[in-house]
Image: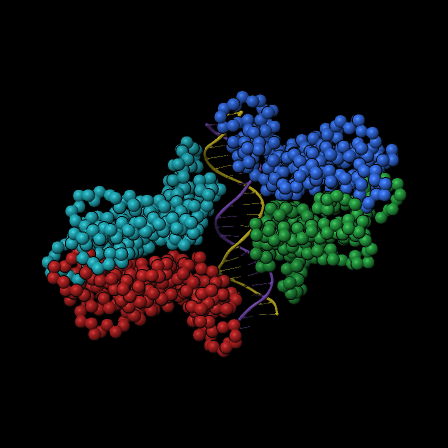
Chain colours: A blue, B green, C red, D cyan, E purple, F yellow
Amino acid sequence: MRGGVISSPWKKSPERKQERALKREAVLAAAAHVFAENGYHRASLDEVARILNVTKPTLYYYFKNKEAMLFACIEHGLEMFRSEASGPSAKAKNGLQRLTAYLKRYAAVIESDFGRCTVRISDSELSEPSSRKIRRIKSEIDRELRQLVADGQADGSIAVTDPQITALALAGALNSIAFWRHQDPDLPVDKTVDEYIHLLVNGLAPRTSQARK
Amino acid sequence: MRGGVISSPWKKSPERKQERALKREAVLAAAAHVFAENGYHRASLDEVARILNVTKPTLYYYFKNKEAMLFACIEHGLEMFRSEASGPSAKAKNGLQRLTAYLKRYAAVIESDFGRCTVRISDSELSEPSSRKIRRIKSEIDRELRQLVADGQADGSIAVTDPQITALALAGALNSIAFWRHQDPDLPVDKTVDEYIHLLVNGLAPRTSQARK
Amino acid sequence: MRGGVISSPWKKSPERKQERALKREAVLAAAAHVFAENGYHRASLDEVARILNVTKPTLYYYFKNKEAMLFACIEHGLEMFRSEASGPSAKAKNGLQRLTAYLKRYAAVIESDFGRCTVRISDSELSEPSSRKIRRIKSEIDRELRQLVADGQADGSIAVTDPQITALALAGALNSIAFWRHQDPDLPVDKTVDEYIHLLVNGLAPRTSQARK
Amino acid sequence: MRGGVISSPWKKSPERKQERALKREAVLAAAAHVFAENGYHRASLDEVARILNVTKPTLYYYFKNKEAMLFACIEHGLEMFRSEASGPSAKAKNGLQRLTAYLKRYAAVIESDFGRCTVRISDSELSEPSSRKIRRIKSEIDRELRQLVADGQADGSIAVTDPQITALALAGALNSIAFWRHQDPDLPVDKTVDEYIHLLVNGLAPRTSQARK
DNA sequence: TATGAATGAGTATTCATTCAT
DNA sequence: GATGAATGAATACTCATTCAT
């Protein structure tokens, strides 16, 4: 069905020489896809296996658990967010510009299966230890975002009162893309993200002296 | 466990005089709570029943299905959004003020179990006919929100380019509250909502002539 | 739905003065209908109640059990068979004629809900004591039928070797009507029964000197 | 309990080498047994599993559904009827002889679990699509039987007026064996079938010139 | 008498997970 | 490395039955 979306290293025909790591990644990608689409509980390992042209037990060769898969997916997604965070924003002049650039990259990550599944799936689906780890990473990301806001406050390019809540609001607004995106494939993504960010940067209220973006 | 959260008309001791409607509402409230907490699939009717001090089949006396419960929850949640929409915003002068007032009430609804479960649970959990009904109502709400934005545009109190995407962004930002709210009970709700709305109204970028809210 | 088939003494409107016996009969008739249509296990008391415009617990005022209803139905059905057995066949001259007349009446009973449910439903659905009672009555009926065959043998009007098995075959052939009758409502009943009996009397093989019926 | 009736390829001790097809057949045989004994609704998959020394979910490895099991049972039963139909009756001289031979084989099939469950269980237990398929096959079998009767009419070896109803009566008489057979294990089967067929061929009425079978 | 309300027992079904091969 | 086969645990749902009113 969606078999085309993910390319499987098993391929039914025997190119079966790939290294374990590669296959593990393929499993992860397939899992991310299914998790992103259905959420954790509605996602079935049968479907993951089917996408990969593999049988279910095979998945257990690469992951201990369904939960381990979810954990790896989220971890990977968070990694994407973090690596994007430290992206090529050096050239940007001030805090607001750096934040804006970051938000764009953040939105791009959300478009991916890993991003969507990271954003959509609640930590509470995981066991306490895993959940704790994830929350730790998430709060680091939060902190980074908050820091960007604070930086902007410091250099006067951003004017808000509470950086923490602002960070939540920013993330929340962008995260929401993960939820309706796949149902509403008509809306052009790029334009949407730009509009989102424009709103967040400029606000609803009209500006007398347009210092637009 | 969470037995305290919901007050049950059964109460083990037989004050069994309540009308069916009341009990049905209690079932609904319990279901909304469990759905909001766990999502649809992870929610078990056993837990709903336990909260109410009732056995599972009793639930079927009031609802045909698990799905029927979810449908009623979402319908009820949407009803709350809609009735709030037509709230006391008459006094507000311009479009932006009316929109702001609306967003505040919207955020209040999200705080409730019904609101949270309406926002958190994807339509795709429902059967096609039910899903269609829900989507219809949701798009009406969307339209109302969009209309508020457009009104503001018309009277010059709101400056955005695309009212539709703006509406999505506004809703998305507020909806995100439903996802972390219960995990992070430290943050003060009112302040959070105010900050959210302040951000959305004024944007990140500082305003030269502060015409604050 | 099938509410029209059975006339209910409750009638929603209050002619509620009938005697218990009458109502009990109505319950029985409704039960027989549902049993005949669906078999014992697929038959639900909800449907019986619905037909009667009554609630389920009411049925328990007239019968102890679902099983008691079935027992009564079968008992009643068997009673019909037996009373028909002793019908106006006195005028018939010989054993074959009396048997033929009996088979016709037997077939008529099978057409009724009681007959159908008596024939369709296996004794093994009942508890041992009830089942035993029913089997006793059934074997009496068998014996009567067998006797009719034997009588015919005695007066030379019937030529078979084993009256018992013959009786089973006769009953079996007619009973089969109960199974396809309601699905195939096109076939004319009378003609069918006549044809059945003609076959049983004359056999497949052509007769040189047609001493028809 | 009835564990002895069906031999299970699982056998608790692991001779686990059998092919899937074999096991699937074993499941089917067990299901047929339980269906034949209890009817569809009273039959529980627990019992099927118990007979096979297997857990219930295992059954789902071989069949999608309880209904799928029933469908396969009936289909298999019908297949038996059809393959018997085209049995070694070539040597038979005339239509009546061919029909008689067919009826004997038909009766033999009815003795089996598949035959009994095919005959005992109403199509209406199946979903519409399945039911339709079954009805189609059944009517083919009916047609074959009818054709045999008609052939006999044509060559003068059978004298009846309506071949269709005659076919129904013949099948009905034999089918009835499926209903009392297991309750009355004393009666000798072969003799019973012979007697049935003798009755159907020669009729009750004595023949002046005995052209017996 | 009749009913609303509730329940216990049973049943089909799903799915993550294991294990021998 | 991969799979066929099997399972345990959970879960939604049905239905006959009871009981207070």
Q: Which residue is the extreme one toward the left?
A: D209
Along the line of sight, the residue nearer the viewer: D156 or C51: D156
Along the line of sight, the residue nearer the viewer: B165 or C213: B165
Q: Residue at x 63, y 46 (%)?
A: B122
Left/right of residue B95 with respect to residue C162 in the rendered view: right
Residue B77: horizontal and vertical position, in percent?
Answer: 68, 54
Q: Which residue is the extreme one toward the right?
A: B209
Query: Image quadrant of residue D199?
Result: bottom left
Q: Is residue C28 visible?
A: no
Left/right of residue A73 with respect to residue D9 in the rendered view: right
Q: How many marks?
A: 0
Residue A111: horizontal and vertical position, in percent?
Answer: 66, 36
Along the line of sight, the residue nearer the viewer: B40 or C157: B40
Along the line of sight, the residue nearer the viewer: D192 or A32: A32
Residue D203: horizontal and vertical position, in percent?
Answer: 19, 59
Residue D62: horizontal and vertical position, in percent?
Answer: 44, 40
Q: Residue at x 44, y 48 (%)?
A: D67
Left/right of residue B80 with respect to residue D54 in the rendered view: right
In the image, is residue B43 above or below residue B92? above
> Which quarter of the figure is the C terminus of chain A placed in?
top right
In the image, is residue C32 above or below residue A199? below
Q: Residue at x 70, y 55 (%)?
A: B82
Q: Residue at x 34, y 65 (%)?
A: C111
Query: Image quadrant of residue B91?
Result: bottom right
Q: Is residue A207 visible?
A: yes
